Amino acid sequence: MTAEMPLHAGDVNLADEDFFARGEAHALFRILRREAPVHWNPGGELLRGWWDITKYEDVLFVSRHPEIFSSERGIVMFEPVDENQRALASQGNGKMLITMDPPRHVRLRRLINKGFTPRAVAVWEPAIRKITGELLDGVAGKARADFVIDVASQLPLAVICEMMGLEKKDWPLMFQLTNKVLGAGDPEYQTDVPAAQRGTADAARVTNNLGTMQMFGFFAQVLQARRAEVRQDLVSVLVDSEMGGDRLSDEDILWFCFLLILAGNETTRNAISGGLLALSEHPEQKARLLADRALLPSAIEEILRWVSPVTHMARVANDDVEIRGQQVAKGERVVMWYPSVNRDEDVFPEPDRFDVGRSPNEHLAFGIGEHFCLGAGFARLELLVMFDELLRRFPDICLDGPVERLRSTFIGGIKHLPVAFAPN
Amino acid sequence: MRVVVKAELCEGNGKCEAAAPEVFRLGEDDLSRVLVDEVPEALLPRVEQAIRLCPRQALAWVGNEPPARE
Ligand code: HEM
Ligand code: SF4
């Protein structure tokens, strides 16, 4: 069933994944920013309701007050009404960096954040350039390709797998499992469910659970290997770490691996493919960038703003609190919509214009504050190198078929993007 | 007004140095340091900007008070 485009805030329901699959969510956000910037989205029989936060200043406020807005009760909007389902959905709450509150969050983050500072990231540039070059050489012989499968997904996959010290033979499995976990709502990844049942909420739950279990099974083996022989990778750093005098438990490490492999894969991929899509849809901006390569850094920031690869992060209010005049009650969930705040008219002049030279451009695609994306430096470097090499080799790359978007309210994903490397 | 960098939060993103190079410098250890004791009047807006832009919320006025606004 295709939902009709609502005209007023009262009719907006951001749980409807089809708006995102069709790339129409911006129309909904525009209505909310204008009419109800802090908007109560009623739940229903299955889901509890939540507050939609659509303005930039309000996301700053929520993100900068982790003592009021907790991450420990889940960072996605969905909170099932059903007890059992809620228990299942909240398995990882409080266990991962991203679902933890200070002071524990600060301590855990300090164990590994030295590996993510600008200096640490810069060390990776030659490796990232080599991987990118090999990838692009690999498609150079083809006339056309699926840009997501052949290019955009491969670089982030290779980088995070290298960081974690995973063997190359396991990389395709990681691609498959991260799709299952974060793309669980999309029938394409519901391969463990009989075809007739795909596309349902149950199918999404089964897919997510199976993907999660397989991931834990896989990383349990990696962990065992690292305990036996410490190496120079992120998993080894975790094995070797202490927090408050204690070693991290197996469970802590496995959740950390789970977070890293997901966060490293399902985000940068969509910034790369979404960036190519944006450049293709704005040929004058692409021409501008080709003519003046010094614009590359600002083009990358504009791609991040434009695409906003992570669609939302949620928090739960620890107390009654007021946001923009709305009373949010203790225990209620607030959902920060990054694509919306990144096109907030009060912050970005002409927000719906894609401008590779935009400056200033203080977008919030990586969040801000306590949970500011740990991998932002890696993501930026991957994007820089990718677009540098891509536009150098294939300045004429163009779309060669319809874009297929992910059916998800959490990841602004592109599943397939057919391209031709030279004009027809 | 005095400003501090909270070392346990700073991750060397360098937004502070870009906003107010007279006040902040990123060290070899990827930690930002405050170069001045008192922030000169003329630099207050830029330090405010740095505090606002720091992705890790690692900067704060001493005593946490923002300077009075016009
Ligand atoms: C364009 C690509 C990316 C985008 C848009 C992105 C976005 C985000 C966002 C919005 C958050 C959460 C902010 C919050 O809850 O307030 C986050 C957290 C995180 N990201 Fe990324 N991310 C990207 C790439 C990466 C990469 C490549 C890695 C790993 C190498 C990574 C690792 C993480 C981790 C570990 C966290 C949790 C941090 C914490 O809770 O302290 N991300 N990211
Ligand atoms: S902007 Fe914040 S995190 Fe970055 S160097 Fe300055 S104080 Fe540190």
Image: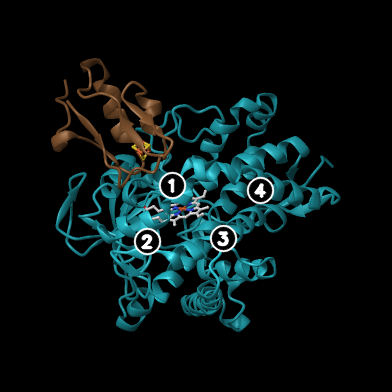
Distance between mark 4 and mark 2 Cα atoms: 27 Å
In the picture, the disc for residue A366 is 1
Q: Position of residue A72 (x, y in %)?
A: 29, 65
Please name the amino acid that badge 4 sits on: Ala
Q: Are marks 3 and 2 on the same chain?
A: yes
Mark 1 touches mark 2? (CB < 8 Å): no
Give whichever of A163, A217 is nearer the camera: A163
Ligand 1 closer than 8 Å to the CB at disc 4? no
x and y percent of residue A375 in the render? 48, 50
Residue linked to disc 4: A127
* Numbered disc in front, either 4 or 1: 4
Residue A75 visible to the viewer: no
Q: Does the beta carbon of the residue at mark 3 sit less than 8 Å from ligand 1?
A: no
Chain B hue? brown
Q: Earlier in the sequence, mark 4 or mark 1?
A: 4
Which residue was labeled with disc 3? A406
Residues indicated by labels 4 and 2 sit on the same polypeptide chain: yes
Label 2 C-beta lies within 8 Å of the nearest ligand 1 atom = yes
Disc 1 element: loop
Q: Earlier in the sequence, mark 4 or mark 2?
A: 2
Q: Is residue A20 above or below residue B42?
A: below
How far apart are the alpha carbons under marks 3 and 2? 25 Å
